[in-house]
Image: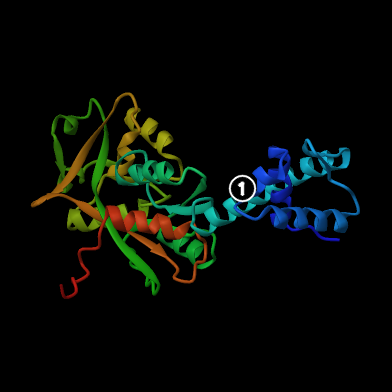
Amino acid sequence: MSVELRDMKLAIVASQHRSLRQAAQTLNIRQSTLSRRLRDMEYRLGAELFERTNGGTRPTVAGVEFLVAARRILSETETALHNLKARSRGENGRLTIGVYASPSTGNMYANFVEHHRRFADVEVHTFDGNHERLLAALAGGVVDVAVMTKCRSGWDDRVLPLWSERVIVALPERHPLSRSRAIRWIELANERILLPQRGPGQELERLLMIKLRGASPQRILHQDAALDSLLSLVGADYGALLILEGATGVRYDGVVYREVCDDDGPTRLNFMAYWREANGNPTLGPFLAMLRERYPDLSVEAGPA
């Protein structure tokens, strides 16, 4: 015994109109065709679904039970098909994003907001780490895409240039340098520098050593702690903290942010998106398309008009 979904739909429409003629008009089929298909379905089920009288067509007791089940089956089927189509278009599912630096403000935060606006049914998970940890997570399929600065390690898969962020120093509000709108690298030579071991800490330390040109900070204090804990240390005057611009959305009493400058202006680090071409997660494509829309790769030469 088998009943097709289309036959269930015919039975439901017939029950709604109580008239095979009106139901056939709604379905845009001949009345004789509708009547025959209902009879065939009843024969396959071994039960009379409709009572046919001169006054119209009404469901029998068995027919009412069948119609309740048919409506549930059709609803569940439509929901499943809708979800399947949405998943294939990347409109729902799970997307894991490798995050290199705090996204409390700036471009990364704006991308989270925009992505959620467009794809509210996609479940986004984040995975923090430095270059090495995020590249390993990409290779192992733990994350779908990593957004981080240009890494020195070789990466032979897909890359998309994105935005740049300024290097920022967080200072105690009462620190003499806080009176300046911008801090030159050499001014950090005599400071105690706090550096996170997570995320961009190693890169910022290398950059500090290069910019100081042989001079050394008073002391570098490596910290395996989250941003809020690091800012509390800054507020308590344990040292100055090097961060990237995206972290400045976190406000902490007694702490001020100042950009760090070279001779030609603020020091910036370029961000890129890294992913594997072989990644088959449907949610990845729409996220990358959004990034391409918001940050077109101007390094690609335009083709002929």
- Inspect this view and state whether residue 194 appears: no
Residue at left offset 59%, top offset 56%:
84
Q: Residue furthest left?
A: 264
Instruction: Name the quadrant of the N terminus.
Output: bottom right
In the displayed structure image, the side of residue 255 where residue 38 appears, left or right: right
In the displayed structure image, the side of residue 295 where residue 177 appears, left or right: left
Tell me the colour scheme of the image: rainbow
Q: Residue furthest right?
A: 46
The residue beneath circle 1 is 25
Q: Position of residue 14 (x, y in %)?
A: 71, 44
Residue at left offset 71%, top offset 58%:
33
Residue at left offset 71%, top offset 45%:
20
Residue at left offset 87%, top offset 57%:
43
Q: Position of residue 230 (x, y in %)?
A: 39, 37
253 to 188, vertically: above or below: above
Q: Position of residue 246 (x, y in %)?
A: 31, 43
Give whichever of 281, 175 is nearer the camera: 281
Report crowding for label 1: few under 14, some 14 to 19, many 20 or more residues within 10 A (C-alpha): few
Give whichever of 84, 174 is nearer the camera: 84
Q: Kindly indicate the quadrant of the structure image that contains residue 52.
A: top right
Q: Position of residue 42 (x, y in %)?
A: 85, 53
Tag 1 secondary structure = helix
In the displayed structure image, the side of residue 257 where residue 50 appears, left or right: right
Looking at the rendered structure, the kind of residue marked 1 is: Gln
Instruction: Name the quadrant of the C terminus.
Output: bottom left
